């Protein structure tokens, strides 16, 4: 009888221990992905700050356009996931572009990442919604900052375009896991695997459960352990789910 009781205790303890390990591993995995995304976003943002600072000085207008084009390309090559850098004037007309030279005559004033950036202060960053690409199989994510001149007036917008898939370290995601990044307004930025459906409403999930807390919820009618965590400084959240 005593032996049976001890065996029962050992079995229960091993189950609790295994669950605690899973709980800890899931939280660490979510934190790892959030830190990775934050670091990459910071690299893109620092690059964008440098670009907007450069174009805030009137002396820049005297630099040859081809030199600026090549300089923008060098910045793009240094940051993983960054695919393009460009600037517009205050009316949304394309001025300098890393993607093509000579710069095309494009009016971008109707783009959300231009309009929203024009309403920001010099210390703010706008992260747009992913843009579907009809030609290639991946999305583009626009990030933008306003350009102020030496007198403090907005003279244009600096834009960085990145591939949101780079925000996730796919090789570190287990085969039974789904990881997604959302804006706090509910817009999904990226998921891996991309085809996941029936995820919880992220705003309601955040309201109902504290961050870094493991929750048992169904996704696609399958049981999961799910946790959300903030991506510091960028008004984004990461949702990490493990299918049991």
Image (cartoon, rainbow, N blue to C red):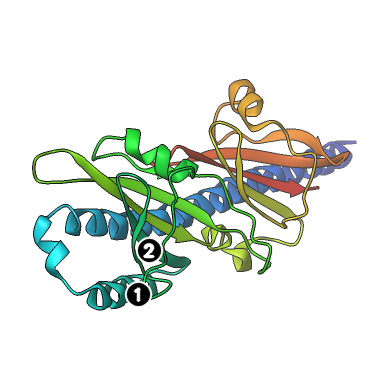
Judging from the image, what secondary structure is the residue with disc 2 in? strand
Q: For this view, does 163 lie left or right of residue 232?
A: right
Judging from the image, what secondary structure is the residue with disc 1 in? helix
Residue 159: image location, x then y, percent:
38, 54
Q: Is residue 208 above or below residue 162?
A: above
Total numbered circles:
2
Measuring 75% from the left and 34% from the top, which residue is drawn there? Answer: 216
Quadrant of the rendered image containing residue 202: top right
Closest to the observer, 235 or 140: 140
Measuring 37% from the left and 76% from the top, which residue is drawn there? Answer: 101
Q: How far apart are the alpha carbons under marks 2 and 1?
A: 8 Å
Q: Point out the tag, 2 or 1, that comes first from the N-terminus.
A: 1
Tell me, for residue 124, which label it has, or none: none
Measuring 37% from the left and 69% from the top, which residue is drawn there? Answer: 103
Closest to the observer, 11 or 183: 183
Residue 66: image location, x then y, percent:
27, 78
Q: Residues within 10 Å of mark 1 (few under 14, many from 20)?
A: some
Q: For this view, does 182 lie left or right of residue 53?
A: right
Q: For this view, does 62 lie left or right of residue 226?
A: left
Q: Looking at the image, do the residues carrying marks 2 and 1 touch, with CB atoms under 8 Å apart? A: no
Q: Which residue is mark 2?
A: 85
Q: Which residue is mark 1?
A: 73
Measuring 68% from the left and 40% from the top, which residue is drawn there? Answer: 226
Residue 242: image location, x then y, percent:
73, 48
Q: Residues within 10 Å of mark 2 (few under 14, many from 20)?
A: many
Q: Is residue 142 above or below residue 133?
A: above
Closest to the observer, 233 or 81: 81
Quadrant of the rendered image containing residue 225: top right
């Amino acid at each position: 009888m005593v032996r049976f009781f001890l065996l029962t205790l050992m079995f229960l303890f091993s189950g609790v221990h295994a669950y605690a390990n899973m709980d800890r591993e899931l939280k660490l995995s979510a934190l790892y992905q959030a830190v990775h995304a934050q670091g990459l976003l910071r690299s893109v943002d620092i690059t964008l700050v440098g670009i907007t600072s450069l174009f805030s000085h009137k002396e820049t207008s005297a630099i040859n356009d081809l030199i600026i084009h090549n300089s923008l390309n060098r910045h793009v090559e240094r940051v993983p996931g960054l695919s393009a850098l460009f600037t517009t004037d205050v009316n949304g007309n394309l001025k300098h572009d890393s993607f093509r030279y000579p710069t095309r005559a494009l009016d971008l004033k109707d783009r959300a990442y231009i309009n929203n950036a024009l309403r920001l202060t010099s210390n703010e960053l706008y992260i747009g919604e992913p843009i579907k690409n009809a030609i290639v199989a991946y999305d583009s994510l626009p990030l933008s900052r306003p350009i102020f001149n030496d007198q403090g007036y907005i003279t244009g917008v600096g834009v960085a375009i990145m591939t949101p898939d780079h925000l996730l370290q796919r090789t570190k995601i287990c085969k039974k896991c789904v990881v997604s990044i959302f804006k706090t307004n509910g817009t999904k930025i990226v998921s891996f695997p991309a085809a996941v459906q029936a995820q919880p409403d992220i705003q309601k999930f955040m309201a109902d459960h504290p961050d870094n807390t493991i929750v048992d919820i169904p996704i696609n009618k399958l049981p999961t352990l799910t946790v959300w965590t903030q991506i510091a400084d960028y008004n984004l959240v990461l949702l990490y789910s493990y299918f049991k």
